[in-house]
Amino acid sequence: MLKQGTNTLSTGGAYTHNGPIDSAIAYLQTGACGDNGESCTLVEVTLTNPTSPGSGSSVDLSLVPPHEFSVTTGFGYYNGCDGTGADCTSADCTTAFHQSGDTQVQVACQVDNVDLAITFCD
């Protein structure tokens, strides 16, 4: 699932969007996930071209309750910031938010028109 607010952007497969995506979420709907990914591993996404230093794209993994580890989840930027991303393979992964103050796990990209690949392994 890829959602932005109450709008479902995709229920699987490739998704192309021209323009910024602000505050979107992605999760693998295993049947146990709530409407906003509750009880599942969450990917939080903002993709935008930077207008000043530090104002570009930011993506992270979240296990902040009510979210919890459900499946191996990862993401990576490409067509800019290649090789930059994160994976979470267990409930104690250090690459995901476990509490709201874990801002060091956010992965930024300051390149225009960057692409993002999100993977889930069930």
Image (cartoon, rainbow, N blue to C red):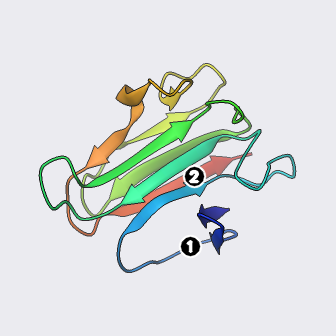
**Alpha-carbon neighbours of circle 2 within 10 Å: few (<14), some, or many (≥20)?**
some
Element assignment for label 1 = loop
Q: Is residue 46 left or right of residue 91?
A: left
Q: Above or below — where is 41 with respect to 58?
A: above
State the quadrant of the N terminus. Answer: bottom right
Choose top left, top right, bottom left or bottom right for residue 73: top right
Kindly identify the residue that appears in the image at 39 percent across and 29 percent down. 103
Q: Residue at x 59, y 63 (%)?
A: 5
The amino acid at mark 1 is Ala
**x, y percentage for residue 97?**
52, 29
Residue furthest left in the image = 52
Left or right: 1, with 117 as reference point: right
Residue 69: where, in percent of width, then height?
70, 32
Identify which residue is drawn at 24% across, 65% down: 49
Residue at left 87%, top 52%?
31
Compare residues 26 and 55 and report the one nearer the observer.
Answer: 55
Residue 66 numbered mark, or none: none
The quadrant the C terminus occupies is: top right
Position of 68 with respect to 18 (left or right) is: right
Depth check: give the residue in front, 60 or 101.
Answer: 101
Rendered position, 52 above or below 114: above
**Residue 17 in the image: x percent, y percent?**
44, 78
Where disc 2 sits, the SS reads strand
Q: Dot 1: within a 10 Å radius of its alpha carbon, few (fewer than 14), some, or many (20 or more) residues?
A: few
Q: Which mark is residue 14?
A: 1
Q: Marks 1 and 2: CB-CB under 8 Å?
A: no
Marks 1 and 2, how far apart at CA: 11 Å
Disc 2 marks which residue? Answer: 119
- Residue 6, given in percent of the width and then of the height, sits at 66, 67
Q: Earlier in the sequence, mark 1 or mark 2?
A: 1
Q: Amino acid at mark 2?
A: Thr
